[in-house]
Image (cartoon, coloured by chain):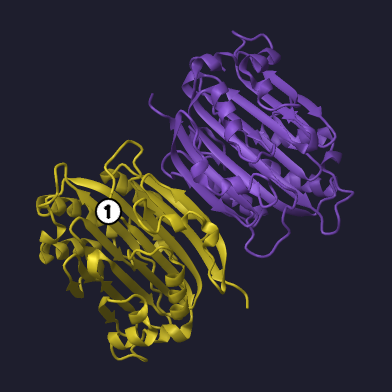
Chain colours: A purple, B yellow
Amino acid sequence: MDVSCEFFEGTEKLLEVWFGNEDSYRECDLRKIPRSAWESILELVKCEIISFKKNDSIDAYVLSMFISKNRFILKTCGSTTLLRCIEPLLYVAKEIGGFDEVLDVFYSRKNFIRPQLQDKPHSAFEDEVEVLENFFEGAAYCMGRVNRDCWYLFTLNPIMPAKLIETPDQTLELIMQNLDPKVMKIFTREVCATAKEATVKSGIDKILSNVTIDDYLFKPCGYSMNGIMKGGYYMTIHVTPEAHCSYVSFETNFPQDGYHDLVMRLLKIFKPGKFMMTIFANENSIASESLQDYRNLTFYGYSSKELQICHFKNYDLTYGLFAKAPS
Amino acid sequence: MDVSCEFFEGTEKLLEVWFGNEDSYRECDLRKIPRSAWESILELVKCEIISFKKNDSIDAYVLSMFISKNRFILKTCGSTTLLRCIEPLLYVAKEIGGFDEVLDVFYSRKNFIRPQLQDKPHSAFEDEVEVLENFFEGAAYCMGRVNRDCWYLFTLNPIMPAKLIETPDQTLELIMQNLDPKVMKIFTREVCATAKEATVKSGIDKILSNVTIDDYLFKPCGYSMNGIMKGGYYMTIHVTPEAHCSYVSFETNFPQDGYHDLVMRLLKIFKPGKFMMTIFANENSIASESLQDYRNLTFYGYSSKELQICHFKNYDLTYGLFAKAPS
């Protein structure tokens, strides 16, 4: 990665799968799956494990992969081939994890900056959907502008009665672009000698409290971190600092009544020129009520370019695109 | 049209364009454009005028075309080539109508049942968008499931400050499919000798009051009607009664505080197996407030499959897909 010239696709592909079992799934657990099995799967995806931390409820790997009892999350950037993990994932989840059902699936990503650099099927969402439909009967959506900035989603959203995820669940994702070059400098070896230094200097360590942090600073630049909390909560940040393709993503399932304050903290840290926000909340989530009125979603210093709300079977999704207001 | 065998694409393409003028547009009027000019334009679209009615504020043509002082609406079904009207429309709107600005554009349609039967660029939305982008800087959206029932929209939704439509404006559209065959029979020459008979027998004459109706019953079947009201309000219904491809659309700009009762009247008349509903309302519309809470949008006997809300610069759009609840 050359800071000045080379292009890097920071835009991640994100897959989240919830598993269940026809009977009870007391004995089932995805964490029974050994690291060697994950390594084989990730080889197909063209990425690898560079660090690992765990607590009672969650195993967290950098790249970013989070394994809980019945929830699998994988987030990969660049030209990785994420969807190739599905077949072996379903296999090990059944054979080792003991799960015979998929309760829900969320595959999502922003439109790529350079889709032509992606391997099949990732260069076009319709091709990705075709692959996903081989495994799941699901629904595909495009939020935002089909012909500009947009965000793709494939999820089960079952039409027929189905088992739903009853655990309160919510996910906030912020995809930031055109970031402040001074802030981006922090995530280079030029400025910081260690990942920990970048984490503290940027203020990432203060975003949420009681977080066990696993951070990694790439050479010559680039940054990834996983944070895990009690109760199966996680946060993860990935930074592509190069000025011509700067990209930062933040994601957490940490429950909040409303996400305004957390988003404002992130905007103060990263100072993006524009950002995309998605919030999922199911009916049992404490985030659910405050999201009903999207007119509340205003962020000081930014103006809203797009706002959409989708009501799915078990989840409400809020999508917004914001850009720095002219000062 | 053979009632039993031949396929007919009832799905309409719908274009609405609002015009303005740099200075005042007191003297400008689209109704100065002579019928012969419209006929030439419609020839390019592959459709024709079969009937005409007017009042003080609106000229209404069957097919469906509604011309007001500064608003143009054209709705065509089958394999018509609607987008070919844009270039000549902009020309006559300027040269004869006196308008030099486009205030807003709405091009929309449901996904076609058989897109392969459409002429270019209508077989794919991305091709339609390409054509539209030659004339307008706009935004393209897909509501609903990209891989199933969905509804496409192209509109200006300007990112930069722009003149907006200040007149209160709202549009309800209902696209109904899998309709009750007994109801559909009304719209055949077998059951009704005249259009008026079909209008009364079905109850279409009772949907809204004080409407001047212009109705047409095709041979052997099929039905179109325009209704015009004081104040530039219109309604229009198109019926494709063939059992294997039954399709009915209803559209009106008649203002309502909430559209629940009007939609229930339509569902009682047509008894669709499923329907798609879109409601546009700008900030000055009386419909605006009641649409904020989409959880109010429930219709007895139907369950909601999809619900989405989009907040555009000057309009809120509500999209819903509903299907008959199992009895």
The residue pinned by badge 1 equals B167
Quadrant of the frame with the N terminus of chain B: bottom left
Q: What residue is at 33 percent from the left and 36 percent from the top?
A: B160
Whether A110 is drawn above or below A292: the answer is above
Quarter occupied by residue B204 = bottom left
Whether A117 is drawn above or below A318: the answer is above
Of all residues shown, which one is farthest toward the right? A27
Q: Chain of mark 1?
A: B
Quadrant of the frame with the C terminus of chain B: bottom right
Whether B31 is drawn above or below A87: the answer is below
Compared across the picture, whether A73 is left or right of A27 comes to left
Q: What residue is at 33 percent from the left and 90 percent from the top?
A: B192
Relative to the observer, which residue lies in front, A14 or A325? A325
Q: What residue is at 57 percent from the left and 50 percent from the top?
A: A129
Relative to the observer, which residue lies in front, B165 or A142? B165
Image position, residue B215 (x, y; %): 27, 79
Q: Is residue A151 visible?
A: no
Q: Is residue B242 visible?
A: yes
Compared across the picture, whether A225 is left or right of B49 comes to right
Quarter occupied by residue A233 = top right
Compared across the picture, whether A100 is left or right of B280 comes to right
Image position, residue B14 (x, y; %): 33, 60
Relative to the observer, which residue lies in front, A158 or B265? B265
Q: How many marks?
A: 1
Q: What residue is at 61 percent from the left and 17 percent from the top?
A: A202
Image position, residue B226 (x, y; %): 27, 73
Q: Label 1 crowding class (10 Å Cα cut-off): few <14, some 14-19, many 20+? A: few
Image position, residue A143 (x, y; %): 50, 46
SS category of the residue bearing label 1: loop
Three-letter amino acid code of the residue under disc 1: Thr
